[in-house]
Image (cartoon, rainbow, N blue to C red):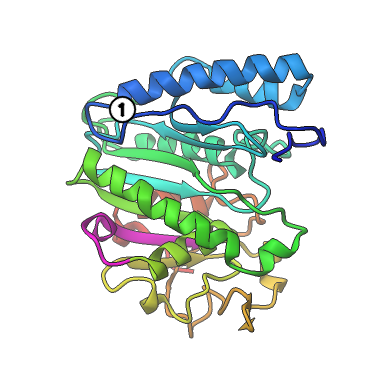
C-alpha cells in the first residue's frame, strides 16, 4: 500500500482524476479539473492532520496557478505551467532531482528557487525581465513558458535509489510522454530541458531510451546542472541535434561524488568534464541548491539556454 509521507498509514489521498489528452482545446479543462483535485487533497490533508502537505497545497491554490497533472498519493507528483503554453516561442521544462515532493514543490530550506515550483516562477520572471516587451504570465505573445515537471517519483538523497538510473528510467518514459503532449499543444515551439541533480539522470534516460520522434526533435537544448551523471558515456549520445549544456557551482558538493558506472551502479561520466563533451556554462560560486537564485550567473545562463540564445551563455 502507498503511504502518506511521515504517517506510516494507508494512503488517504485519492488517485488522479481522468483528464483529456493534451491539446490546445483541453488545457483549460485540465487546469480546472486538477484545481478541483488539489482542493479535495487539501481537505484530506486537513482531515488527517498532514499539516506540511496542507500548507503546500494551499499555496497551489493561489490565484493564477495552473496544474496540468496532480497526484497526491505517496510523496506526490505535479506538473505546473507558468506562462502561455499554446503560444510561447520557447518552452522550458524544469526537471527536479532527489527529495522533491509535493511538500517541497515550492520551497525548501528557505530557498524557493531551489524547488520546481519556485524555480519555474523565478526563471519565468528572469526571462520577462530580459524581454524588450515583457508580458504578465499567460498573456498572448509571451516568449517563454516554463513547466515545473515533477512527473516521476523522485528518490531520496540518502537512499540506494540515487546510485542507479532505475527511478530515472520510469521518469524518462513519463517525460517523453509529456513532450508528446507538448508537441500536440504547440508543435512550432522549441523546447529546452533544464535538468537539476538526479533530474539530469531522468533527462538522460529520456534521451537514450526513446526513438527519434517529432516531439523529441522539438528539444533544442538540454542543460545539466548539479548533475551526478546521465548514464550516457558522452554528450553526443544524448542527442544528434540538441545543444548539450553542463554547469556546476564551485561550492556544489556534487563535485565530490564519484562519476563512474559499473555493473549497473553509478551514473557515468561527469557532465562538466572535457571528455563528456558538453558545452560548459558558468554556474558561479553557488551550491547545489543555488542554480536558479535571483541575480546569479547560473540563473542568467540558464535563462539564455531556455530562451534559445546560445550566444548569451557565458562559458565556464
Task: Give the camera-side residue of 141 and 5.
Answer: 5
Q: Position of residue 127 (x, y in %)?
A: 37, 40
For label 1, the SS is helix
User: Which of the pair 186/63 is nearer the observer?
Assistant: 186
**Residue at 53% from the left image edge and 64% from the top image edge:** 201
Tell me: residue 157, above or below residue 119. Answer: below
Residue 222 falls inside the magenta stretch: yes
315, 77: nearer the viewer: 77
Give the image quarter of residue 53.
top right
* Quadrant occupied by the N terminus: top right
Asked whether residue 52 is drawn in magenta, I would say no
Closer-to-camera residue (303/101): 101
Residue labelled with disc 1: 27
Q: Residue at x 31, y 51 (%)?
A: 191
Residue 309: image x %, image y %?
29, 55
Q: Residue furthest front?
A: 1
- In the image, 107: left or right of 139? right
Where residue 108 sits, quadrant-wise, is top right
- At a point 26% along the width and 69% down the height, the residue shown is 241
Q: Which residues are magenta?
A: 211-224
Amino acid at each position: 500500500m502507498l503511504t502518506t509521507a511521515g504517517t506510516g498509514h494507508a494512503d488517504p489521498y485519492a488517485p488522479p482524476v481522468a483528464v483529456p489528452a493534451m491539446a490546445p482545446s483541453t488545457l483549460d479543462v485540465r487546469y480546472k479539473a486538477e484545481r478541483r483535485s488539489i482542493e479535495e487533497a487539501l481537505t484530506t490533508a486537513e482531515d488527517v492532520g498532514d499539516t506540511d502537505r496542507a500548507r503546500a497545497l494551499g499555496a497551489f491554490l493561489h490565484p493564477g496557478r495552473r496544474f496540468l497533472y496532480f497526484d497526491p498519493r505517496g510523496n506526490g507528483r505535479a506538473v505546473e505551467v507558468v506562462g502561455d503554453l499554446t503560444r510561447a516561442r520557447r518552452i522550458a521544462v524544469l526537471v527536479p532531482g532527489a527529495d522533491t515532493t509535493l511538500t517541497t514543490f515550492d520551497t525548501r530550506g528557505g530557498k524557493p528557487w531551489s524547488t520546481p515550483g519556485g524555480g519555474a516562477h523565478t526563471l519565468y520572471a528572469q526571462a520577462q525581465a530580459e524581454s524588450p516587451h515583457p508580458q504578465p504570465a499567460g498573456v498572448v505573445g509571451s516568449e517563454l513558458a516554463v513547466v515545473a515537471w515533477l512527473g516521476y517519483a523522485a528518490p531520496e538523497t540518502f537512499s540506494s535509489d540515487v546510485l542507479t538510473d532505475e527511478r530515472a528510467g520510469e521518469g524518462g518514459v513519463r517525460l517523453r510522454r509529456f513532450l508528446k503532449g507538448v508537441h500536440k499543444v504547440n508543435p512550432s515551439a522549441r523546447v529546452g530541458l533544464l535538468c537539476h541533480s538526479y533530474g539530469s539522470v531522468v533527462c538522460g534516460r529520456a534521451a537514450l531510451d526513446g526513438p527519434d520522434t517529432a516531439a523529441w526533435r522539438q528539444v533544442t537544448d538540454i542543460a545539466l546542472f548539479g548533475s551526478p551523471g546521465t548514464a550516457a558515456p558522452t554528450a553526443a549520445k544524448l542527442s544528434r541535434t540538441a545543444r548539450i549544456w553542463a554547469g556546476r557551482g564551485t561550492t556544489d558538493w556534487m563535485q565530490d561524488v564519484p562519476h563512474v558506472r559499473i555493473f549497473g551502479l553509478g551514473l557515468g561520466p561527469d557532465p562538466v568534464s572535457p571528455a563528456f563533451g558538453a558545452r560548459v556554462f558558468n554556474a558561479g560560486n553557488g551550491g547545489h541548491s543555488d542554480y536558479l537564485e535571483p541575480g546569479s550567473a547560473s540563473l542568467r545562463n540558464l535563462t539564455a539556454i531556455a530562451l534559445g540564445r546560445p550566444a548569451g551563455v557565458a562559458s565556464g
